Amino acid sequence: ELWEFLTQRIIPVPEREYNPGLKKALRLAAHPEDAPYLALAFARHCPVWTNDPDFQTEAVAAEVQIYTTRSLLHLLEGIA
């Protein structure tokens, strides 16, 4: 039941939506499998939430906002 609850809220993004930024993302990503996440962030103009240190480089940070769980919690504490 939990899996169904979670997955019914997930909307797959077609590759054609983030494909234009994939080449740039491949240059920035430490690992090729990380590139689609960066490319999607470029396409949607949104931040990435990850604790993966490979995303926390100056080159990546110059292109997309990266949040760690700690930084998000810090932001939320400031709101409460």
Image (cartoon, helix red, strand yellow):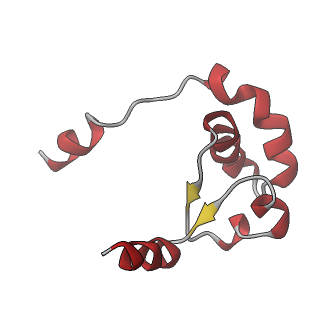
Residue at 25% across / 34% down in the picture?
8
Q: Residue furthest left?
A: 1
Q: Is residue 30 visible?
A: no
Looking at the image, residue 48 lies above or below residue 12: below
Q: Is residue 8 visible?
A: yes
Residue 73 or residue 54, whichever sits in front:
73
Locate residue 42, reporting x and y percent: 70, 40
Looking at the image, residue 8 lies above or below residue 47: above
Residue at 88% across / 49% down in the picture?
27
Residue at 77% across / 35% down in the picture?
22
Looking at the image, residue 75 lies above or below residue 7: below
Write down the quadrant of residue 77 in the picture.
bottom left
Residue at 71% across / 70% down in the picture?
56
Write down the quadrant of residue 65 in the picture.
bottom right
**Residue 9 placement, left or right of 27:** left
Figure label count:
0
**Residue 15 placement, left or right of 69:** right
Quarter occupied by the N terminus: top left
Locate residue 14, reporting x and y percent: 56, 22
Locate residue 46, reporting x and y percent: 59, 46
Write down the quadrant of residue 79 in the picture.
bottom left
Q: Residue furthest front?
A: 79
Residue 39 or residue 42, whichever sits in front:
42
Locate residue 13, reporting x and y percent: 52, 28
**Residue 45 placement, left or right of 7:** right
